[in-house]
Every structure is written in structure tokens, then in C-alpha cells.
Amino acid sequence: MRFLKESKQFLVVAFIIYVILKALFVFGVASSYIQQIVQYAVIIALTSIGLNIIYGFTGQFSLGHAAFYGIGAYTSAYLTKVLGIDSLFSYIPVLMACSVISGLIGFLIGIPILKLKDDFLAIATLGFGTLVRVFFDNSDKISDVLGGSRGFVGIPKITNLELVLFFTLFIIVITRHMINSRFGLFWRCIKDDELAASSIGINTANMKLMAFTYGCMLAGFGGAFYANLYTFLHPSNFDILKSIDFLIIVIIGGMGNIVGTILASFIWVGFIEGLRIILPSEVLDIRWVVIPILLIFIMMWRPYGIMAKKTK
Amino acid sequence: MEQISYILQQVVNGIQLGAVYALIALGYTMVYGVLRLINFAHGDVFMLGAFVAYFLISKFGLPVYLVFILTMVSCALVGYVIEKVAYKPLRDAPKISLLITAVGVSLFLEYFLSLKALFTPNYIPFPKPFEIETYDLSFFVITNVQLLIFIITFISLFILYLLIYKTRYGIAMRAVSYDKETASLMGVGIDGIISFTFIIGASLAGVGGILYGIAYPQINVFMGIMPGIKSFIAAVLGGIGIIHGAVVGGLIIGLCEVFVSAFLSSTFRDGVIFIILFAVLLFRPMGIFGKRIEKV
């Protein structure tokens, strides 16, 4: 329980945010659409923290994060639908299963591909993402429930604000401790200079694999919540463009900055989903013209992200 | 007998697709040679080629040879501008920053063209520049579109060969891709050669775009993503940085894709290409024609 005490300030802020959100929800100030996108933003934050571990802390560039998010989503959707789960207590084991499966697949795929560096790792993870998408597209040949390219329908709606928020908080506290532990130090060493890290006795292959697996496990949780929030899945929700979304969030939030990632997720979801209520659709299309330009400018002026900690 | 002619027919179709992949892969491999960058926007230059051709044919009704020339010029211009605006300021930045910028350029081109005022994100039918004729060669049939693709690809490759192996620019380009610092010490203007590489690569992708549009007459602003990635895989398969490797890799990828579609299922074709990628990266990362690099 020591680590809960150390994160006290953070937990107090989080609890205040929860009370405000709950009040807004209960008194009907926020419409059900807004309630949904608030939960969605928390899910995106959870998944993006996973990518921040892989890319921001350990420096392993992954363009396949949406695949692990998708694996979590499909696992949860399948388990909750087939087993008929609708209560919160029986949902927790399902969540664990999703995360373990995402993590296990990340582990197995990580053993060969983490030997690659930079751009080849990007292409390999992108390739894995496409393979997973092809698998989802053809999944109706394995089991009709999965729906294949028609999409997975009729998933029970279990995700609610308390579950998502408190679970994500729990994960964030654990993640902060991972980062402040020996392992977190090793990860940052590998990011700065892999050769130097291995020369001082860090087992770089194992540490990279650990960071990658952990990041994939968080994506698995995120995916599971997503499936049980929207109750409908389609393979196109988990393609390259989705992986790029997570990447943009990590870059806006700053590499190696957890709080920045959380803020960036809310800004991002607000920008992409929230603006739909206010603006007409002609204006909305311009969002995706502005975002890439912003991305290029960020890379020129702040290559480690807008909210990144200052580096020498 | 019927089986053999079916297989031969698929070989012809595979070379048709593979030729387009080879044209795109050349741009990837040359840019990777001089900059060590996966130019993600290259697939979108290919898409742009198809859209410029669509625009020129449907709005102005230009003859085919003019369409080719104008499309190549405009794609070369776009390639040049992309390099100068997006990549040049980042030449000394970390590798990943350059890669993210490339993704940004790619997204920008896609979503800018998909604005409702421009081309919309929907599929657009590509106009026929000429009537399609079919010639029956008893074993297989071949269309004039396929012949056009084979001839244009062959001519492009021949010109490229002359350019790279017989001119001073080509020698300079090979020198830059071999060792940038030493080349600049020998008096090679690095910036000029990099721009030159982008111009050549982009115009080849433009040619690929027109041919793709004529052969598969449905164009869309996102059509460049998958052919772009597959062509990059072709370049890796042949050995990245090696010109003839890109051509052979493109043909292999094209044939694989067509054969998987014909004999298994068209939904598996992307999967098979990426399995090839994994196999190459794990067992022969230098590609078919590459030489093993000694670890330092």
C-alpha cells in the first residue's frame, strides 16, 4: 500500500474529477453522448499510456498498437457474449483474460520483431497490424459470432464510468511505480542509447520485450472496455489509421510523460468526437487536414512532443 | 490443359500488378538509399498520379502521351516540394522524427484531397483513355492495357538504368547512397542529389498511378496506402537500396498477390504479403540481392 500513499495527490485530483463528472451525469447536464465520449477518452488514455511505455519510455517505435487494442476488444466481446456475462464481478476475470491474451500475443510477436530497429520495426509492427486486421475480416470463418467483415454485434454493455475510471487509475498508479522502479530506469536507458545500456549490463532484449508486453497488456484492457462500451466492433476500427491516432496522442502528450498522455487523450477525443456536436460536417473535415500539418510542425520544433519534459 | 492456361493467365495478371509495384518500389528504394528514410508519403504520390491523370483525361480529354508527361511533371514537382518543405529541415533530427513527418505528409495528402470541395473520400470511376481490346493467344488472353503497362514499365526501367548507370547524376546518386559524408567531400552536392532522387522516384510513382488507374479503374484518395506498403515490402524483399532488387521484388509481390487471390481467397492476399515481410526481415534482412553487412 506504500505506493498508494505516494500517489496521494494524484488520487485526490482524480477523485475530485470523478465527483464532478458523476454530478454532471446524474443531474443530466451531460447528454448520454457526452457520457459515452468521456468514458471513451479514459479508454483512449489507458491504451495510449501503453504506447507511451513502448515508444515514449523505451523508444521502440510501434505502428501496430491498434492491433493489440483490437485483440483485447474482440476477446472481451467474444467472452462476454458467449458466456453471457453482465455483472461487474464476473467481468473482472474477463478483463484479465483480455489483457493476458493481448500481452501474450505481444510477447510472442515481440521476440522476433524487437530485434529490428526504428523504421524496420515500424514496418514490421505495421505488418502485424494488417495481419490482425485480415484475421478480424475473416474471423467469421472461425466462428460465426465474430462476424468477420460484417462486424461484431450484440456485445453486452458493461463498461460504466466508475469501472473505467477507477480501473484506469489503478493501472496508472501501477505504471508510475513501474516507471520509477529499476525497470523504468532500464527502459529509459535503452531509449537513450541501446548500445551503452547493454554495455553496463542491462539485458536489452528482455527489457524491450517486457516494456512491449506491458504496453500491449494495457492496450488489451483498453480494447476490452471499448468493446463493452460501444457494443459493436468492426475490423476497420483497428487499422493503421487507429494506430496513428495513438501515436499522435503520445506525441502531443510528450514522450515519457504519463500525465501529458492523459491530457492529450482528452484533448484528442474532445477534438475528434466532441466537436461533432458543435460544428457542421463541412468544417469537421478540415480537422484531418490540420492535424498532419500540426504533426509536422511538432516534429520540427519539439521532436519529443509538446508536453515532453525538457531534455538537454 | 485448362489448368495450365489458367495458371498462365494468372502469371500475366500478376506481372501486370507487379510492374506497377516495381515502379513504386523504385522510388522507395532510391529514397531509402540516399536518406535512410521510409518515405510513407510515396504511396500518396502514386495516388496523386492517378488523380492528376483522372483530372486531365476527364476535364481536358488530353491524349494519353500528354497525360503521361504532365502527370510525371506534376508528381515530380510534388515530390520535390515534399522533400524541401517536410524532410529537409529534419535532416539531422532523430530517425523516428523523420518517419513521423513522413506519416504526417501522407495523412495530409490523403485528407486534403478527400475534402468535399476537392475529390471526396468516395470511389471515383477512372475514365477510359482508349477502348480496351483483348488478344487471344490460345494459352492466355492479353489486353492492350496489359501490353501498355508492360511497355511503359520497360521503357521507364530502361531510361532509369541509363540515368543511374550512365550519367554523372547517377554516379553521384550512387555515391551518396554509398556514403553521404565521403561523397560530399568528393564535391557531390548532397542537397541537389537528394532532390533529384525524389523527383525521379515521384515521377515513376506517377507513371505507376496512371497505369494502376487504367488497369483497375476505381480510384480513391486512400488507394495509395496498401500499394505503397506492399511496394516497400517489395523493395525490402529485393534488398533495400538496390535498383534491380526493387523490380524483382515488385514482380514477386505482384505474382504472390494474384496467385493467392486466384487459388485461396482474395481476403488473404494482404496477409500473405506481410508473412513474406516477416520471413524476409527475420531470415534474410538484406533481401534477395543484398550483401550481408558486417556488424560493427
Image: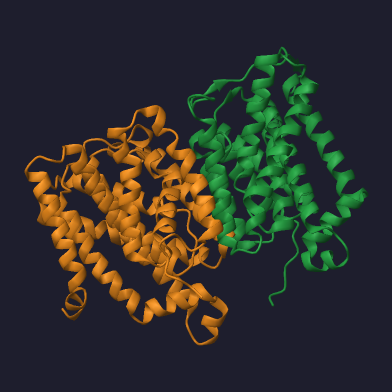
Chain colours: A orange, B green
**Horizontal and vertical percent position of residue B272:** 55, 45
Depicted B26 relative to depicted A108: above or below: above
In this rendering, position of residue A152 left or right of residue B284: left
**Horizontal and vertical percent position of residue A214:** 35, 66
Depicted B154 relative to depicted A125: above or below: above
Callout count? 0
Depicted A115 relative to depicted A273: above or below: below
Write the residue at 86% across / 49% down: B164
**Horizontal and vertical percent position of residue B107:** 52, 42
User: Which quarter of the rendered picture does the N terminus of chain B lie within?
Assistant: top right
In this rendering, position of residue B131 left or right of residue A270: right
Write the residue at 25% across / 58% down: A97
Write the residue at 29% across / 58% down: A46
Which one is in front, B32 or B258?
B32
Could one spot residue B235 in this view of the protein? yes
Quarter residue A16 falls in: bottom left
Judged from this view, the residue extending furthest toward the left is A27
**Horizontal and vertical percent position of residue B65:** 80, 22
Which one is in front, B110 or B277?
B110
Could one spot residue B288 in this view of the protein? no
Judged from this view, the residue extending furthest toward the bottom is A200
Depicted A138 relative to depicted B129: above or below: below
Write the residue at 21% across / 78% down: A6
User: Which quarter of the rendered picture does the C terminus of chain B lie within?
Assistant: bottom right
Quarter residue B143 falls in: top right
In this rendering, position of residue A147 left or right of residue B207: left
